Image (cartoon, rainbow, N blue to C red):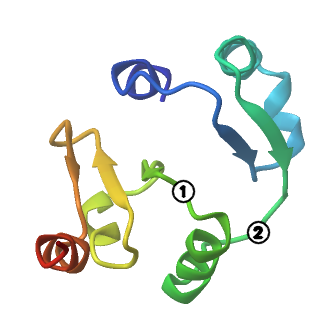
Amino acid sequence: MRMDIEKAELHNGLFIYSMWCGYRASDYQKKFEAYLKQAGFDENECHTSGHATVSDIRRVITELKPKLIIPIHTMAPDLFIGISEYYISTSMNDKLIPNPTLERRNRHRC
């Protein structure tokens, strides 16, 4: 994850930790969170259980209004394309993918 964040040159974001708090004791996680803090990320812990549904993911994206979405812990990051207006970055293809609806809407602006 850190490499993806560094590659995208992200700073001053929001880190939402949603896994079991016991994992935060690992050296890897401590180093990763220290890096995020140094990069200006705020932190919010919100434990969840299981996997989110597409409608739950849409609702979170709608409420947070992110500038960029980086899907992690998924085998199909490209499935995020089209569920929101925001740009998607996937480490599988290293490029930003705008939602096609947003692209069409922006083309028609004066």
Q: Determine which residue is flagged by label 1.
A: 66
User: Which residue is at the far front?
Assistant: 110
Q: Is residue 33 above or below residue 105?
A: above
Badge 2 element: loop
Q: Is residue 5 above or below residue 21?
A: above
Sequence-first disc among 1 and 2 = 2
- Which residue is drawn at the image coordinates 41% and 21% (left, top)? 9
Q: Is residue 55 left or right of residue 36?
A: left
Q: Quadrant of residue 83?
A: bottom left
Which residue is at the front of the view, 25 or 81?
81
Identity of the amino acid at label 2? Ser
Q: Which mark is residue 98?
A: none
Badge 1 element: loop
Mark 1 crowdedness (10 Å alpha carbons): few <14, some 14-19, many ≥20: some
- Which residue is drawn at the image coordinates 23% and 61% (left, top)? 98
The percent coordinates of residue 28 (x first, y second) are 66, 16
- Which residue is drawn at the image coordinates 78% and 34% (left, top)? 42
* C-alpha span from label 1 to label 2: 23 Å
The percent coordinates of residue 69 (x first, y second) are 44, 53
Which residue is at the front of the view, 62 or 76?
62
The percent coordinates of residue 78 (x first, y second) are 24, 63
Which residue is at the front of the view, 88 or 108?
108
Rendered-image quadrant of the C terminus: bottom left
The percent coordinates of residue 59 (x first, y second) are 62, 81
Q: Is residue 2 above or below residue 97?
A: above
- Which residue is drawn at the image coordinates 50% and 22% (left, top)? 2
Q: Is residue 96 left or right of residue 64?
A: left
Q: Which mark is residue 49?
A: 2
Q: Is residue 91 left or right of residue 108?
A: right
